[in-house]
Amino acid sequence: MSLKVLVGCKRVIDYAVKIRVRPDKLGVVTDGVKHSMNPFDEIAVEEAVRMKEKKLAKEIVVVSCGPQQAQETIRTALAMGADRGYHIDVAADKMATLQPIHVSKIMAKLAEKEKADIVMLGKLAIDDDSNQTAQMTAALLDWPQGVFASKVDAKDKGLEVVREIDGGLETINIDLPAVLSADLRLNEPRYATLPNIMKAKKKKVEKVKPEDLGVDITPRIEVVNVEDPPVREAGQSVGDVEELVGKLKDKGF
Amino acid sequence: MKRIFQLVTRNQRSGQILDSTRRYQNRRWLASVSNIKPEVKDSLRRDLEAVIGETQVSSSDSVRDQHGQDEGPHRGAPPDLVVFPSSTLQVSEICKICSVHGVPIVPHGTGTGLEGGTTAVTGGVTIDLIKNMEAIREMHTEDFCAVVEPGVTREGLNQFLKSDGLWFPVDPGANASICGMCATGASGTNAVRYGTIKENVLNLEVVLADGRIINTAGNGSRSRKTSAGYNLTSLMVGSEGTLGLITGATVKLHAIPESVAAAVVSFPDVQSAVDAVVSTLQCSVPLARVEFLDEVQMMACNKYSGLQYPEKPHLFIEFHGSESEVSAQAEFVKDIVEQHGGGEFEWAVKQEDRTKLWTARHRAYYADMSLRPGCKIVTTDVCVPISALPQMIQLTKEDISASGLIGPMVGHVGDGNFHSMLLFDPENEAERQECKAVADRMARRAISLGGTCTGEHGVGLGKKELLKEQFGQDALSVMKAIKLALDPNNLMNPRKILDV
């Protein structure tokens, strides 16, 4: 097989950062805060690179939406082994209302433009936890989907995908072209090494506006309020079971 | 093997399984050893709160308890107060206040040390440096260095550096504070190729007992080498909080290797495993990691992680470099291993396979603890010249066997450093003493062979006598003079390393 894989990677606040709510309560602080590639997207990029190493795929094209800094995320993917990138230029203030519906339209348009065989995404982004983009993209393209993939292999002319579901593992066979989303146990992504980071600087990244792809990213939601979770109160020690039951009854349980 | 099995079942039969639930119910808070008068304590508290705010000063039992106990076998002791400063200036003010009141100062990082470094043996104020001081102050990717505050841990820094193609290779196992690692002179599995923390520190920001703030290699310096003045950086590394508090560290970073391959191989006996390592090093193969696990440790790892390694001595090896370098090194070492009677190489190149392979080694400490649930462990830490290693390990295993203790062994054999985990029941004083006796004999043996009583864990509370034996009166007197010059009132982490 010599498949072309289109991989989406989102620039999110790094998972290790302590999130702080903005004073205007309309979002979280992003200025000067460490950002990195969404961990599930790293897994998606890694899987695409492994497909290329196994000679299943011949070209990997990565896509990221956002302001100028989104290019850093694309460069990281290129350093991991992707070939080319698309930077979908979206201003920083528009990112809060850029939703899976918009991103999936962008991915679908690019998939058609590039004649991709596989669209790979992370199963969800760690900032909005939506878990919608892969499924919506598949619907827009009318392609089969293998989401929450923990193993992907070529089988006959299609793919065999093992999916992580509530009951355990489900194995499905799907035709190509297809949309996949990466779950945690699919692989452990490689690190970008200095020589590869250097090489990545020479790889092509095309900057495109959503309008150029015919996608309207006018907000369909309005963020009304963002708040911290309530501060944890001190616990109370109780002497014995009777006291515990008494206190629970007082609280109305 | 049979002997170990008998030991475990004998304990079970005599009903001495250490029931963790029962022990928790009988738990008292750690005995307080403070001798600070109440009026002094009140005045002290008010002064501290004035500097850092009420919410950052704690006298609650659980907070003091947690801060007074590290992960080692020494019974902890809580301080009188725990404070959580947010800046170096605040740390300096705290030290001045403690100096005025004549109250001991105990620095606290992640509390993952093994030698009682955070134990407040004479009470006082524990300064928790990690809660509010966790910034990576500077990152210089082109200069391969970073400046970190005490709250930055090894894993935290590496996560930050991931997309820059750099890493911080000093890996003592625990996810320790990097400044804490400087304080204990830490090392780890990668030292054979990348050096210990000593070789990877360029500059330290230190607060002294009287509140003075110094930069050991010069203000803002991140020069790769320097010949300027006394080497204060080296003086502070390994000083275990007895000379000053480390509030910032400028550390060297390294390039993430292009290619990494890991291998596991078994040997018929200890001698052949260690000989294989010695031969490999003699051929100057730049091994990145070479870890020795004895058959007892392999048994523990198998049980704990559900693995199926043969219960024989093993070497866990890692090669770093370009793809061709790694291949060449691996081939070469494969031959050497065969010559020494080693078994088949079990290989891994993919990230998750390597992680799986190394899991056994990384969980070794916990695997050992689960051999006797509820036990504590005396971890020995001797380091000898490589040529003396086979003899050292052999004599040690004989000693452990004769004492009837369970003592799995892991070793950073590339440095001549190995750890025996001697398990004991914390309620059984005789057993604790036996472990200590075996550990002391081991240290003396190492010293007599040209080695050191502690390769990477530090002296702390338990090795003060061994320190005297290793150095002799004159060198000790120099250490004491330095201690008294920097801390005339002996307030900085008293009774650790040496007594004045």
Image (cartoon, rainbow, N blue to C red):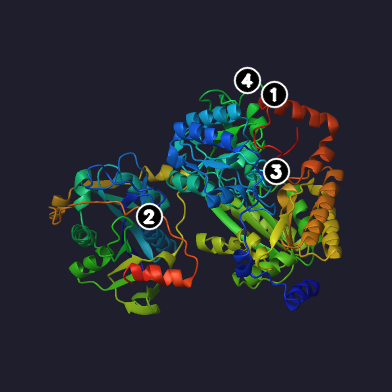
Disc 4 target residue: B228
Name the residue located 76 percent from the left edge and 60 percent from the top edge.
B273
The local secondary structure at tag 3 comes to loop
Do the residues marked 4 and 1 share a common chain?
yes
Query: What mark, if any, has residue B485 been given in the picture?
Result: 1
Q: Are marks 3 and 1 in contact (CB under 8 Å)?
A: no
Mark 3 or mark 4, whichever is nearer to me:
3
In-front residue for pair A108/B235: B235
Mark 4 or mark 1, whichever is nearer to me:
1
Do the residues marked 3 and 1 share a common chain?
yes
Image coords of residue A18 (percent x, y):
38, 48
Q: Residues within 10 Å of mark 2 (few under 14, many from 20)?
A: few
To which quarter of the image does residue A252 belong?
A: bottom left
Q: Circle 1 marks a residue in which chain?
A: B
The local secondary structure at tag 4 comes to loop
In-front residue for pair B290/A18: A18
Do the residues marked 4 and 2 share a common chain?
no
Query: What mark, if any, has residue B107 been given in the picture?
Result: none
Disc 3 target residue: B458
Residue B208 in the figure: left or right of residue A94: right
To which quarter of the image does residue B201 belong?
A: top right
* Quadrant that contains the N terminus of chain B: bottom right
Mark 4 to mark 2 CA distance (whole Å)? 51 Å
Name the residue located 63 percent from the left edge and 20 percent from the top edge.
B228
Q: Give the mark, 4 or 1, whose residue is nearer the N terminus.
A: 4
